[in-house]
Amino acid sequence: MKTPNSNSKENSKSQFHVRVLGSAAGGGLPQWNCGGDNSIRARRGDLSVPARSQPSIAVSSDGERWSVINASPDIRDQFSKFPGLHPTAGTRDIPLETICITNPDLDHTIGLLILRESLPYKIVSTPWTRDAILKHNACFRLMKSAWTGAAINESFFLDSKKYLEAQFFAVAGKVPIYLQELEVNHPEATVSLRIRDNRTGKQLVYAPGLKEYNEETMNELQKADCRFVDGTFFTENELLTLRPDAVPARTMGHAPVTGPHGSLERLATLPGRSLYIHMNNTNPMLDSNSGATAEVHKAGIEIAFDGMEFLV
Ligand code: MLT
Ligand code: MN
């Protein structure tokens, strides 16, 4: 006879699982060279400002085998903290199926080098991103045999059971700083990912870098049941107030949360679940007791945190 527990375990084997591996932007929280308020409080262990690793999520169609969206420099520690991605005891079998890369940013790709010891998984990015990384960064060629390109709107499956069907879609973005003298911007340079569970039709969008919320992007976000979006900066001039030589949020490729055409007012109009991810260490949303966090929650938007898990 099945116990209620075994029933729910059976059910979870046919559901779309999400685990937030890391929720901060590049540098994480605390950032090693940062003496800003959030970093100081996170270092001190202040419970209102929990430490966060660099941005990545894992998804699964059965809670047993996982795919990862973006490979952060913290991937080793993120896997170690997540039993779902531990190897089977006594083997080197790891339940990792696909790693998707949404752009060549270092906080989205350095993790590939950390996983270089073997390649039992596949890597998928746009051809532009794969080619730009492989052409200009020789060490990434270790991963070449596992790395396929998927053009914008070309379907591929994340899982071997072929339940989670994914496509990249174009969004306004930029070429990462380290490639700016080597490559010009291209529609495939910054993309977001839509993932559809073919059993239920439920859709998740992952969009950690969004320079603007234009009509096409809003259409994509609107269709999703659940969306992770760029939460880098709370205000357009957040970095400028700390460092006069810094650039405004949009110039860096990140629409701010607040202000005219900010993300909060756009997300507040959408049905389903919206979560901010990729928060920079300057963002007041990192303090759970701040007015910024209250404002976001009041609009019905969530702030992703490391270790967060849910079903779509
Ligand atoms: C970061 O994670 O710090 C930013 O994405 C960097 C950038 O946009 O250049
Ligand atoms: Mn980043």
Image (cartoon, grey):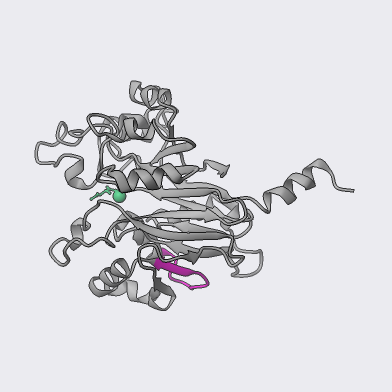
Position of residue 200 measured from the top left corner of the image (x, y, whole percent): 61, 51
Position of residue 242 measured from the top left corner of the image (x, y, whole percent): 16, 33
Q: Quadrant of the C terminus?
A: top right
Q: Residue at x 36, y 32 (%)?
A: 286
Residue at the outermost bottom position: 145
Q: Quadrant of residue 48?
A: top left
Name the side, left or right, on which 67 lies relative to 11. left
Residue 48 or residue 235, whichever sits in front: 235
Name the side, left or right, on which 213 lies relative to 148. left
Please indicate, yes or no, whether residue 41 appears anywhere in the rendered image. Answer: no
Q: Quadrant of residue 34?
A: top left
Instruction: Say if 310 sits above or below 48 in the image.
Output: below
Q: Main secondary structure of the magenta part?
A: loop
Name the side, left or right, on which 40 lies relative to 99. left
Position of residue 244 measured from the top left corner of the image (x, y, whole percent): 9, 36
Please indicate, yes or no, whether residue 93 appears anywhere in the rendered image. Answer: yes
Instruction: Say if 73 sits above or below 275 in the image.
Output: below
Q: Residue at x 50, y 53 (%)?
A: 58
Magenta segment: does it hold 120? Answer: yes
Residue bounds of the magenta highlight: 114-124
Residue at the outermost right position: 1
Count of labels in the image: 0
Residue 237 or residue 269, whichever sits in front: 269
Instruction: Say if 11 sits above or below 285 in the image.
Output: below
Magenta segment: does it hold 282? Answer: no
Residue at the outermost left position: 245
Residue 240 or residue 18, whichever sits in front: 18
Position of residue 301 measured from the top left corner of the image (x, y, whole percent): 43, 31
Instruction: Say if 44 sits above or below 54 in the image.
Output: above
Q: Residue at x 14, y 42 (%)?
A: 247
